Image: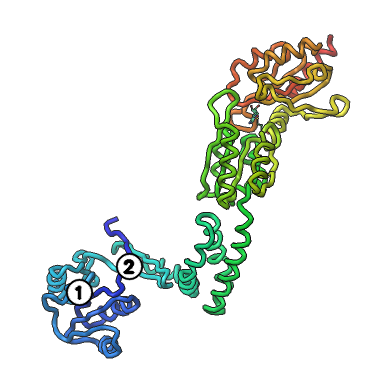
Amino acid sequence: MNHFPIFLALENRRVLVAGGGDAAVAKLRLLLKTTARITVVSEHAAPEIVAWADAGKLNLIPRAQEPGDALCCVIAYGAHENAVLDGRTLQLAAADGAIVNIVDDLARSQFITPAIVDRDPVVVAIGTEGAAPVLARKIKADLEASLPAGLGLLARVGKTFRKAADVLPMGAVRRRFWAAYYNEAGPRAADQGEAAIRDALDTLLESHLNAETRPGHVDLVGAGPGDPELLTLRARKALDAADVVIHDRLVAPEILELARREAIIIDAGKEGFGPSTSQDVINALIVEHGLRGHHVVRLKAGDPTVFGRLDEEIEALDAAGLGWAIVPGITAASAAVATIGQSLTKRGRNGSVRFLTGHDMKGFADQDWAALAKPDEVAAIYMGKRAARWMQGRLLMHGAAPATPVSVVENASRGDQAIHATTLATLPDALSDVSGPAVLLFGLAPRAAAQALTHQEIAL
Ligand code: SAH
C-alpha cells in the first residue's frame, strides 16, 4: 500500500484549487460537498466557478497563482490540465505548506482523491493507486446500488441520538440497541423522513431500557462429545448469538470455531486431578458476564446435566437474578455406545442403565456395587480411568463375573476415537494406554465381539 487512506478534517480549513477548466470544476463539485473554505485562483474561470463565487460558495481570485496563495491551506489542487502550470502550482503550494494533488498525474501528486460513494456522514472511499480506474468505477457503481439512499439520513439522525443512547450501559446492551436501529427500526422508518426516524429511535430506546432492567441471559449449553455434527441446532444458534463463551477443557476446538466472531472466548478448564479453575471462580465468571448484560453461553462437554456441576452454576445464577436456560447435548455415553453398535437398554437384558462417576469430590465414588454386580447390568462409567482397579475390586467382591464385558470408548466421536474391548478381569490393564477422555461401558461388548462371545458360550 503506497497510499494510506485517511479522512481529513476540513471544517473551516482552507483548500486551494489552481485552474478554472473542466478538471477544476470536477474537483470543485466534490470539494463543495465539504465544509472547507475554498479558494480558486484562475484567470479564466469556467462559468460554473463564477456562479459558485457569486453565490458565496467559494472565493475566486481572477489571476494566476502567486506565492502565499496556499498559505494555511491543508491541501491544494493543480487543475490547469497543463503540465507546466501544474508544476508551478506544485512548487508554490508545497512551499506554502500544503500537500498537493496534480489532477490526473499520479507520479507528481502528494496525495490522490479516491472515488467516493457519498451517504454523508457515511462516506466510502475507493482507491486503486491508479492501477485500475475502471475497477474503481465498477466498485463505486456496485456500492451506489447496494447502499440505500436513506443511509446518510439514518446515520445523521443516529449521530444526534448518541448522547441519549448513552443511558444504556456500555457494551453489548448498547451495541444491541444500535444494531436494532441500523438493521431494523431505522430502515423501516427511513422512507417517512426524519421525524419518523426520531420517533423510531425514542420507541426503540424505551424498549431497550425496559429490557435492560432484565439483565443478561445465560445459556447452559451441551457441546456434545466432540464431533461438531453432533451439536444440536439450538446449541449452534446460541453459539451464533453469544457475546461470551465460557467453555470446559473437553470442548473441541472445532466447536469453539462456531462461536460468533466477536464473542469473547474464555477457557474455564477443569481436569479431574490436574490444574483447574475452581467451580467458585467459574460461577463468578458466568455471573459477572451475565450481569454486564451479555448473552453468555456456558459451554459444557456432552450434556450439561450429566456430571457437569450444573446445579451449582444454576444456583449462582439464581442468586444473581440472572435468567438461564438449559440446551441439552449428546452425552458421552450415547456417543460411546453408538460407536460399539449397542444400545444402552435392551428388552430382556436390562430395563435400566446407570450413569456412574468413577470419582467424586471426595475421591473414588462409592456406588451400589452389589446391584451392579448382578448379571446383565449395564452402566456407563464416566471419569473412571483412575478408579478402574478399585471399581474392579468392589464389583468382583460383590460377585460380578470376571468375564463381564467392558468396552472402553476413548475420544468418542472425535477423529482419534478408539475402542478397547475388555472384561472386568483385565480392565485395569486395558486402560494402561488410554490417555484421552473415556467412557467405560460396563456390561457391553462391541457388537461383533458380543456375538463371538455368545457363540463361545453356546459351544461350551
Ligand atoms: N457432561 C459430559 C460429562 C462430563 S464429565 C457428558 O455429558 O458427556 C467428563 C467425563 O466425560 C470424562 O472424564 C469422560 O469420562 C467423559 N467424556 C466426555 N467426552 C468424552 C468423549 N468424547 N469420549 C469419551 N468420554 C468422554
Residue 5 visible in image: yes
Q: Is residue 105 left or right of residue 313?
A: left
**Whole-percent x, y for residue 46 in the image:** 24, 87
Quick check: 261 above or below 353?
below
Q: Which residue is drawn at the image coordinates 57% and 52% (left, top)?
A: 293
Q: Quadrant of ligand 1?
A: top right
Q: Which residue is drawn at the image coordinates 61% and 32% (left, top)?
A: 414
Residue 147 visible in image: no
Q: Secondary structure at mark 2?
A: loop
Q: Nearer the viewer, residue 236 or 199?
A: 199
Q: Is residue 54 left or right of residue 97?
A: right
> Which residue is tagged 1?
78
Q: Which mark is residue 114?
A: 2
Q: Which residue is drawn at the image coordinates 61% and 42% (left, top)?
A: 298
**Whole-percent x, y for residue 389 in the image:** 68, 13
Of all residues, the one furthest to the front in this rendering is 319
Which numbered disc flags the more N-terminal residue, 1 or 2? 1
Q: Quadrant of the C terminus?
A: top right
Q: Nearer the viewer, residue 55 or 314?
A: 314
How many numbered dots are placed on residues in this image? 2
What's under tag 1, amino acid-wise?
Gly
Q: Is residue 9 left or right of residue 88?
A: right
Of all residues, the one furthest to the right in this rendering is 348
Task: Rate crowding at label 2 as few (under 14), some (14 to 19) or many (20 or more) other CA atoms within 10 Å.
Answer: some
Quick check: 239 above or below 437?
below
What's under tag 2, amino acid-wise?
Pro
**Whole-percent x, y for residue 37 in the image:** 27, 78
- Ligand 1 within 8 Å of the CB at mark 2: no
- Are the residues at dot 1 and dot 2 in contact (C-beta closer than 8 Å)? no
